[in-house]
């Protein structure tokens, strides 16, 4: 009997230990969310599709679609943007872009509406391949996280809190960038007003779907209507010449305006080629040479 009791006690103790360990190992919704974000930051390779739908009554009904493919080894980016807008000033615009690392710089090739290809270079601190700088455990800043709740087996809602914006710190950072222009008092006033409007725009609930097999976010819906309306109200308040009737109309337009951003992620197809095509490089190089001949730019040192 004593042996039986001892075995029972041991089994009961083991069950308690397992239960405690299970509780300790279980992740909270925020920990699961941050884990997926960390994984995507460490392994950004993939194809991203963004849709931005904006409605401002009487003024604009716009849709922007963008695809962005990222390869890390070797580092290469290919993107395409298509914008369609109906309203006071109809807009139809498309753009293409390629990017690749060349030594201590990133060469960016871009064009709009089937126009000429243009090459710009972004200087890096060194020539170490970008893929070699990617860390397996990047730190995710959760300063603006108000909380994460799980609404389904693989669905999460992240609440972002714009009220945590530190406007003074952002202004200091803006002025500390070596290549940044010097802002005059009016520009600083406008920037401060925009940041304050965003700070007061209310929380953002981002609905996301996390693929557990890859631990990556496959879909996200970001409603930005509150932020749009807050910025529009700031814009209306900044115009002194409006009559009371005009302000009333502007307020009504603001109240019916909306914007939502959706982002989808998918792995890159096998054997995908994101390298800059030779004809693009040649076209951009020929354009650059013509610009030098006409005195429109200085010869490149690269």
Image: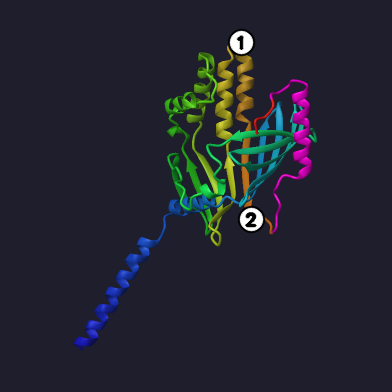
Query: Which secondary structure lies at badge 1?
Result: loop
- The residue at the far front in this view is 301
Residue 29 in picture, x, y percent from top left:
45, 53
Camera-side residue of 147 and 97 = 97
Q: Does the magenta stretch include residue 80?
A: no
Please tell me which residue is depicted at 24% across the width and 78% down the height of the picture.
9
**Can the viewer see residue 112?**
no
Q: Is residue 251 left or right of residue 150?
A: right
Camera-side residue of 200 and 274 = 274
Q: Is residue 132 left or right of residue 5?
A: right
Tell me the residue that label 2 is attached to.
267
Please tell me which residue is depicted at 60% across the width and 14% down the height of the picture.
244
How many residues crowd around disc 2 within 10 Å: few (fewer than 14), some, or many (20 or more)? some
Q: Earlier in the sequence, mark 1 or mark 2?
A: 1
What residue span does the magenta drawing correspond to? Answer: 271-298
Q: In this view, does 195 lie to the left or right of 243?
A: left
Please identify the quarter of the rendering in which residue 232 is found.
top right
Total number of numbered labels?
Answer: 2
Residue 151 in picture, x, y percent from top left:
51, 54
Camera-side residue of 148 and 289 = 289
Residue 210 in picture, x, y percent from top left:
55, 55
Please identify the quarter of the rendering in which residue 65 is found.
top right
Residue 271 in picture, x, y percent from top left:
70, 58
Please tell me which residue is depicted at 54% across the width and 51% down the height of the picture.
40
Query: Which secondary structure lies at badge 2?
Result: loop
Nearer the viewer's eye, disc 1 or disc 2? 2
Q: Does the magenta stretch include residue 290?
A: yes
The vertical placement of 19 against 228, above or below, is below
Which corner quadrant holds the C terminus?
top right
Instruction: Give residue 241's mark.
Output: 1
The vertical placement of 183 against 22, above or below, is above
How many residues crowd around disc 1 within 10 Å: few (fewer than 14), some, or many (20 or more)? few
């Amino acid at each position: 009997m004593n042996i039986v009791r001892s075995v029972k006690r041991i089994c009961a103790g083991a069950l308690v230990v397992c239960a405690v360990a299970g509780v300790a190992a279980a992740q909270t919704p925020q920990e699961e969310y941050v884990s997926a974000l960390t994984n995507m930051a460490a392994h950004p390779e993939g194809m991203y599709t963004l849709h931005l739908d904006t409605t401002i009554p009487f003024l604009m009904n716009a849709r922007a679609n963008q695809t962005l493919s990222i390869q890390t080894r070797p580092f290469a980016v290919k993107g395409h943007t298509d914008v369609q807008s109906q309203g006071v000033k109809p807009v139809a615009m498309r753009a293409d872009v390629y990017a690749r690392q060349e030594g201590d710089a990133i060469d960016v090739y871009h064009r709009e509406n089937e126009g000429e290809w243009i090459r710009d270079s972004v200087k890096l601190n060194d020539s170490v391949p970008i893929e070699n700088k990617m860390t397996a455990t990047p730190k995710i800043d959760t300063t603006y996280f108000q909380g994460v709740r799980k609404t389904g087996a693989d669905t999460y809602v992240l609440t972002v809190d714009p009220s945590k914006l530190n406007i003074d710190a952002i202004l200091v950072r803006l002025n500390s960038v070596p290549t940044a222009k010097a802002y005059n008092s009016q520009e600083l006033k406008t920037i401060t007003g925009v940041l304050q409007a965003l700070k007061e725009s209310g929380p953002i609930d981002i609905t996301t779907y996390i693929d557990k097999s890859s631990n990556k976010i496959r879909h996200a819906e970001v409603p930005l209507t509150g932020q749009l309306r807050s910025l529009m109200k700031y814009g209306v308040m900044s115009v002194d010449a409006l009559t009371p009737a005009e302000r009333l109309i502007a307020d009504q337009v603001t109240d019916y305006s909306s914007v939502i951003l959706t982002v989808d992620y998918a792995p890159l197809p096998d054997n995908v080629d994101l390298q800059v095509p030779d004809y693009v490089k040649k076209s951009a190089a020929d354009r650059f040479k013509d610009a030098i001949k006409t005195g429109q730019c200085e010869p490149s040192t690269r």
